[in-house]
Amino acid sequence: MKMAATSVGLLALAGTIVPPAVFMLQSIAAGQAGSPALPLDTVKTIMLVSTVAWFVAAPFWMKVE
């Protein structure tokens, strides 16, 4: 159980860090000419789901035995 919670927790942390970084880099690359390939609504949804997953997995992962 702890291994599964650790995996979910790490993926959730990546889900809160990677999407905004990708959005920022795409926004910088697109400049004034266009919009980024990853829409902001998608970034927000991924981050929300990742945050919920983190709060579900973290107690099992960091539980003191």
Image: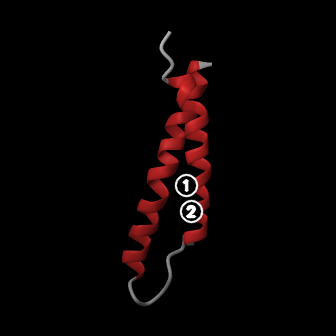
Q: Position of residue 36 (x, y in %)?
A: 50, 76
Q: Which residue is mark 2?
A: 44
Report the front residue among 34 and 65: 65
The crowding category of the residue bearing disc 2, from other C-alpha atoms within 10 Å (few below 14, some 14 to 19, many at least 20), is: some
Q: Quadrant of residue 38?
A: bottom right
Furthest residue in direction bottom, as rendered: 33
Q: Taking 2 as reference, is 55 above or below it?
A: below
Q: CA distance from mark 1 to mark 2?
A: 5 Å
Residue in the picture at 42% in, 75% down = 27
Q: Label 1: state its secondary structure.
A: helix
Q: Report the colour scheme.
A: secondary structure
For the N terminus, give its image quadrant: top right
Q: Quadrant of residue 24?
A: bottom left
Q: Amino acid at mark 2?
A: Lys
Q: Taking 12 as reference, is 59 above or below it?
A: above
Q: Label 2: state its secondary structure.
A: helix
Q: Amino acid at mark 1?
A: Met
The crowding category of the residue bearing disc 1, from other C-alpha atoms within 10 Å (few below 14, some 14 to 19, many at least 20), is: many
Report the front residue among 54 and 21: 54
Marks 1 and 2 close (CB-CB < 8 Å):
yes
Q: Which mark is residue 61?
A: none
Report the front residue among 50 and 59: 59
Q: Position of residue 42 (x, y in %)?
A: 60, 65
Q: Taking 54 as reference, is 1 above or below it?
A: above
Q: Which residue is mark 1?
A: 47
Residue in the picture at 57% in, 47% down = 50
Q: Quadrant of residue 55?
A: top right
Q: Position of residue 17 (x, y in %)?
A: 44, 52
